[in-house]
């Protein structure tokens, strides 16, 4: 039975300039034709074109999902000689199946949350406010109490941004 290896490459997205190809469609066809002929000369047989989704990262600045056109080629892997096949068959050793271990009877304890050590210092007045302390010990339940106090670092950042806006 023949075995194949596959190669997937992006389809051209622009036309290829050449003499006699003046329209965008003819230039694109020329680029595709050139690519397919080059792959054919290297022994690759065209199979199909696929449009596949590609996720370009996560987060708010990601471009989201984009669609890429891919070309699929294949070529036959040369068959091994009968001497090599006979040698590999002799080396094919049958091993008994591995024993299956019993499932553990003891249930594992769920991981305990690590206590949070609150930063305390004169430069951070959030460590001294009651609302910030409650927020740091949050248990995950939604709470609507106000957080009193803003850290000095945030106040300095806001002041520096206002300084740049005013043009001083």
Image: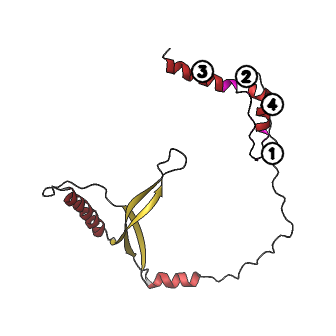
**Closer to the camera, 98 or 113?**
113
Image coordinates of residue 68 in percent, x first then y, are: 40, 59
Residue 123 shows up from this direction = yes
The numbered mark at residue 114 is: 1
- Marks 3 & 2, CB-CB < 8 Å contact: no
Q: Disc 2 designates what residue?
A: 123
Q: Within the magenta stretch, is there residue 159?
A: no
Query: Which is in the foreground here, disc 4 or disc 3?
Result: 4
Query: Which is in the foreground here, disc 1 or disc 2?
Result: 2
User: From the image, which quarter does the N terminus lie in?
Assistant: bottom left
- Marks 1 & 2, CB-CB < 8 Å contact: no
At label 2, counting other C-alpha atoms closer than 10 Å, the crowd grade (few under 14, some 14-19, many 20 or more) is: few
Residue stretch in magenta: 136-153
The numbered mark at residue 159 is: 3
Q: Disc 4 designates what residue?
A: 130
Image coordinates of residue 38 in percent, x first then y, are: 27, 64
């Amino acid at each position: 039975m023949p075995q194949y290896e596959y190669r997937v490459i992006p389809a051209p997205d622009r036309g290829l300039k050449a003499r006699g190809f003046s329209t965008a469609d003819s230039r694109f066809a020329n680029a595709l034709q050139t690519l397919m002929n080059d792959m054919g000369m290297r022994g690759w047989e065209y199979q199909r074109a696929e449009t596949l989704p590609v996720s370009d990262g996560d987060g708010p600045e990601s471009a989201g999902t984009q669609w890429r056109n891919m070309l699929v080629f294949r070529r036959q892997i040369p068959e091994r000689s009968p001497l090599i096949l006979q040698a590999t068959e002799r080396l094919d050793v049958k091993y008994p199946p591995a024993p299956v271990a019993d499932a553990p009877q003891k249930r594992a304890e769920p991981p305990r949350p690590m206590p949070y050590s609150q930063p305390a210092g004169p430069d951070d007045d959030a460590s001294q406010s009651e609302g910030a302390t409650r927020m740091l010990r949050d248990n995950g339940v939604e709470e609507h109490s106000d957080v009193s106090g803003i850290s000095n670092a945030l106040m300095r950042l806001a002041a520096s941004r206002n300084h740049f806006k005013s043009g001083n």
